[in-house]
Image: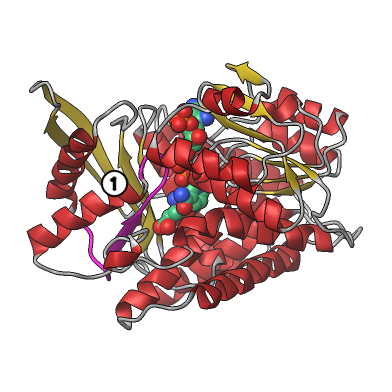
Amino acid sequence: MIATKQSASAIDKFMQMVEKHNPAQPEFYQAVYEVALAVIPFIEEHPEYKKANILERMIEPERILIFRVPWMDDAGNFRVNRGYRVQMNNAIGPYKGGLRFHPDVTLSVLKFLAFEQVFKNSLTTLPIGGGKGGSDFDPKGKSDNEVMRFCQSFMIELFRHIGKDTDIPAGDIGVGSREIGYLFGQFKRLKNEFNGVLTGKGYAYGGSLIRPEATGYGLLFFVDEMLKTKGETIKGKRVVISGSGNVAQYAIEKTLAFGGIPITASDSNGFIYDHQGIDTHKLAYLLDLKNNRRGRISEYAEAFGCPYFEGQKPWKIPCDVALPCAIQNELDEEDAKKLVANGCKLVAEGANMPSTPKAIEVLQKNRLLYAPGKASNAGGVAASGLEMSQNSIRMYWTREEVEGRLRVIMEMIHEQCIRYGKNADGSVDYVKGANIAGFVRVADAMLAEGHV
Ligand code: NDP
Ligand code: 2IT
């Protein structure tokens, strides 16, 4: 497939339309543009998709809910935030995707996430559509009681719009097991129903083993597949990781399990560089620091006597593999150039859209192996799909069962990327592969379901 002059102008026209109809949504344009670049040339060769205007229909969310979330802080002040749920596409299954609580949340951010989720969920091969939601509420610095009151108020509106066969939220930035517990408790109380309406639940009340680990583990399974195409493994490789939340923590754990050497971790204040590597003992400290004490990454540097770089990102540290696991647009063109100059050979995204378009260009031009998040971080939602299956049959699977299925799913995603992304010279364009493979399944379902 060649990006012809005709498809280049079709892409331009399409993006003009997207920008006109969705004013001031830069993150959404960025996510749509990545898909358009890969999918529009493909559609040019498949008139059935063109005729049915599939891509134009896919960028239009099926439903967006925006609501006020009033809550009271511990000092008795009346507080208010904005809540959202973007129900993007349910052609292949009920809406599925996380909730993000972060001060930078806007409709644009949630639309980009919901749009990417549609393709990601399709790639998992499971029957799940795409959605995303959240709030500009910042759980950082709030007491457990404040977080509980906020979650309860958020659910008082959200509960009418979700359901185990309708829309199944989960966690994302700022929404972990604590928040999911409070959200689930309130849903159960309002509906008088105990079911799998949320995933990422605690094991005591219907959660799946391996769900907390799944995004990070899945990322490393995917990296392993990418390296296999070059006859290599991660053993002995130095791995730069950003973030220190759910995804980063288990990316570090699986890197260690595969014999790699994780050397950095970060939060929104800065990063630590542990030249000797974050070992299992130090990882246990990191998990306690972030999940129980809710402290800052700088404390790791104090505890283990390694350098801490305030206000900086880890991409300047020489490495073989880089895994951005924090937030969108955290790896820009300059960062990509530093990675290339320092000999990095592989970048795989644990976060959603962490690399800017210019950064991706630099990585691909320099022939690094590069995997977009919708392929390489799909392990989290895949395990959520497995949690839904277990809830439906009212059973718990073992760790081995869930991890085994997760591994197979990540291998299948990798195969789909190769199927649609292999270049004539044998190299793999994972961006093209993931976007086309994700598109085809949803598009075929939309064609079959008629003009709805
Ligand atoms: P967490 O809330 O557990 O962790 C988020 C991490 O990102 C924290 O270390 C946080 O630091 C850091 N961070 C937040 N804002 C910024 C910023 N502006 N600059 C730099 N760092 C920042 O979230 P997750 O680990 O769950 O999510 C991380 C990424 O992975 C997100 O992009 C998410 O969408 C994606 N993802 C998550 C999945 C999941 O199952 N959880 C599945 C697939 C993708 P601080 O504590 O200072 O805010
Ligand atoms: O971005 C993501 O895939 C997630 N935050 C996980 C979504 C889910 O439903 O488990």
Start and end of the magenta stretch? 162-175
State which quadrant residue 266 falls in. Answer: top right
Residue 320 percent across, percent down from the top left: 82, 41
Q: Label 1 belongs to which residue?
A: 179
Residue 170 among magenta residues:
yes
> Vertically, is 344 above or below 426?
above
Query: Which corner quadrant holds the C terminus?
Result: bottom left
Q: Residues within 10 Å of mark 1 (few under 14, many from 20)?
A: many
Q: Main secondary structure of the magenta part?
A: loop
The quadrant of the picture occupied by the N terminus is bottom right
Query: Label 1 sits on what residue type?
Result: Glu
Can residue 43 be seen here? Answer: no
* Mark 1 residue element: helix
When the figure is inspected, residue 32 is found, relative to residue 137, above or below; the finding is below
Q: Nearer the viewer, residue 50 or 24?
A: 24
Total labels: the figure holds 1
Q: Residue at x 88, y 59 (%)?
A: 230
